[in-house]
Amino acid sequence: MATPLEGRTVLITGSGRGIGREVALLAGQLGANVIVNDPGVNVDGSGGDQGPAADVAKEIKDAGGTASANFDSVATAEGGENMIKQAIDEYGRIDGVVHVAGILRDRMIFNMSEQEWDDVVAVHLTGFFNVVKPASVLMRQQRFGRIVGFSSASGLVGNTGQANYGAAKAGIAGMARCVARDLGRYGVTANAIGPGAATRMTQTVPDAARQMRSRAGVQGAGGPATPQSIVNQLREPKYVAPMVCYLLSDQAWDVNGKVFNVAGGVVSVSWDETPDRTIAKAGMWELDELQTLVPQMMAGLRNPAPPPPELDLPGRPVAQEASA
């Protein structure tokens, strides 16, 4: 196998299991020195086990690659700095950061506690900052670096019961776009991946939640869930790894500030958020003008979670009863 990552040192957070594990294994096969970070927590962030990270590092080394395990938490600045320091101490440089680590604390927004919000944002979004910040200082100096954050359909499209997770994942996509602008002039790229894969996290979604999302029409990027659509969307994690490793390579020098959707054998690039339908006037809008024109502008656009017809809502047109 060719080794396009030969001599590069890559930190992969959350790489003891799932997608992160597959990225770490492939990066090791492609010649990278891999820092396998994973504190081995449960899906909700509780507990801890050094086994997963140690096992993946051993698997890479047993296959002839180079790897080291790291058990720090990405949720703290100290943990992020320790990961980058380990890369420098053991391999002399840091060339890539892939942030896959994450936890779930699903709850409808009206039931969500501040702690559930803080814990999820700390691992996903603040965790991205905690590893990118110290890495960016060195990447800027060496005039090379690759940063890949993991977003999600929950952040890019939306899902019920995941305001904390979706906000963090949308933030990762936004941060990648901003970091791309901060660091592009120094030869450093930053991109995001929206994966579709069967992992521990997807398996924890209760059937009741899936059914609720399906009824609301917000199951995810693929639409309402059916047995076939779940099979199609939730593929093996290994299918996500090649695109991540491509973004880590020298050949991806001009791919910057983008969000890629990766599932199975499908890779797509998302359009940047740009104005689409527009109304304009040379002055301030009057409310009655907006009441007339905004519904025209919104024609054909789907409400992701419409209220049921029987709900009597102010402003909703009264349905005409069929004549006898």
Image: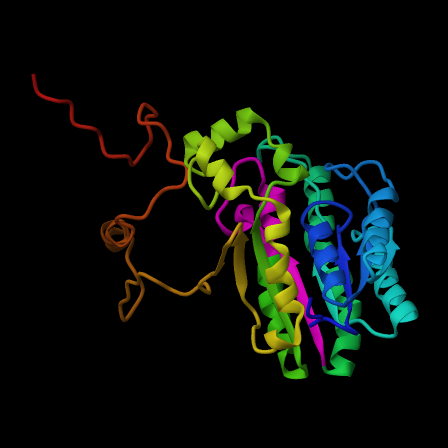
The answer to which of 103 and 111 lies nearer the viewer is: 103
> Where residue 188 appears, x then y in whole percent?
67, 76
Query: Does residue 167 belong to the magenta stretch?
Result: yes
Identify the residue at image location x=68%, y=54%. Answer: 125
Kindly give the residue lying farthest to the top in the view shown: 324
Q: Quadrant of residue 311?
A: top left
* Relative to 303, 264 lies left or right: right
> Where residue 41 appears, x then y in whole percent?
80, 40
Identify the residue at image location x=52%, y=36%. Answer: 160
> Where residue 252 appears, x then y in whole percent?
60, 74
Image quarter of the C terminus: top left
Kindly give the residue lying farthest to the front in the view shown: 1
Which residues are the magenta region?
144-171
> Where residue 42 appears, x then y in whole percent?
77, 37
The answer to which of 245 and 194 lies nearer the viewer is: 245
* Relative to 223, 102 lies left or right: right
The answer to which of 193 and 127 lies nearer the viewer is: 193
Q: Tell me: residue 40, above or below residue 316.
A: below
Identify the residue at image location x=58%, y=58%. Answer: 193
**Colour scheme used in the picture?**
rainbow
Q: Quadrant of residue 241?
A: bottom right
Residue 187 in sight in this render: yes
* Relative to 245, 79 lies left or right: right
Identify the residue at image location x=70%, y=47%. Answer: 102
Image quarter of the N terminus: bottom right
